[in-house]
Image: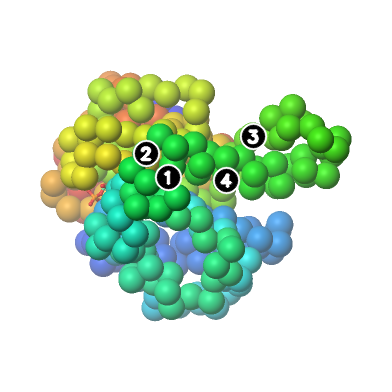
Amino acid sequence: MSAAASAPVLVHRDTDELAGATAARLVARLAQAQSLRGSASVVLTGGRNGNALLAALATAEGRDAVDFSRLDVWWGDERFLPEGDPERNVTQAREAVLDALPLDAARVHPMAPSDGTYGDDASAAAKAYAAELAAAGAEEAGAEQARPEGARAEEAGAGAVPAFDVLLLGVGPDTHVASLFPGHPAVAETERHVVAVHNAPKPPPVRISLTLPAIRTAREVWLLAAGEDKADAVSRALSGQFGPEEAPACGAYGTERTLWLLDEAAAKLP
Ligand SMILES: O=C1O[C@H](COP(=O)(O)O)[C@@H](O)[C@H](O)[C@H]1O
């Protein structure tokens, strides 16, 4: 059975309770990470459950326990659309809560839009995000200081993804996570940390996504699903009968902890 399929499952009464409890859990986890390491990092997900969680974070009790100026914010995937498009995950996250938080803008790392520096070249945008992650990973590992002058980052062992404290993933009705869809080449990627996704079955067709190897560098991976339309996906992913290529959620797990956070409707199938 995969690590994701054998992870603890916490069931909340409904979507609101799931969002509220997860926001409180996130605050506690990030505050703890900051007390241990000085800063914290979170990888956001788009979709209904991710946005409900962010909206709940706006009013979460104890929210001020987190020093938001020492929080790195990354995204697990993005819909490759123009800047400010209402369907972009970053636009929705900003509206839900980010614009109201005292974040350090330099620590907020959205994926590029389709009308930005890389134009409509989603592969170039994915590479750029991988490079941004690699730079942060190198900094975290202290590799930047150790690197001999003139040496390329990769030669100094840099290039790793940072060890995110919490990586959030909304689980789609087809078991997709981030923009890794069942049967798509991106879900089988073993080398790259970020890829362009073309012909996605859910609109928009072009997306950018972290890959499973990048997701698995996170200390904690939290899989979120609420609503009846997610029950089948949850049941498939937790059955232990499918691999990540058929049920991508099965391939998502953290180095320290993996949690399934559900509501009763999503948890209802055996
Ligand atoms: O398109 C996306 O969908 C998934 C799942 O969203 P949901 O609305 O079914 O909960 C989400 O995790 C992903 O970030 C997003 O781009």
Q: How dense is the environment of label 4, judged by Cα within 10 Å: few (below 14), some, or many (20 and up)?
A: some
Under mark 3, the amino acid is Gly
Looking at the image, which is closer to me, 250 or 85? 85
Pointer 2 or 3: first along the chain? 2
Distance in Å between CA atoms under marks 2 and 3: 22 Å
Pointer 4 or 1: first along the chain? 1
Which residue in the structure is indicated by mark 3? 159
Distance in Å between CA atoms under marks 1 and 2: 6 Å
Q: How dense is the environment of label 3, judged by Cα within 10 Å: few (below 14), some, or many (20 and up)?
A: many
Tell me which corner region of the image, top left, top right, bottom left or bottom right, holds residue 171: top left
In the rendered structure, the answer to whether residue 108 lies left or right of residue 147 reads left
Which residue in the structure is indicated by mark 1? 118
* Any part of residue 31 in sight: no
Which residue in the structure is indicated by mark 4? 132
Distance in Å between CA atoms under marks 2 and 4: 17 Å
The reply to whether the residue tagged 3 has its Cβ within 8 angstroms of ligand 1 is no
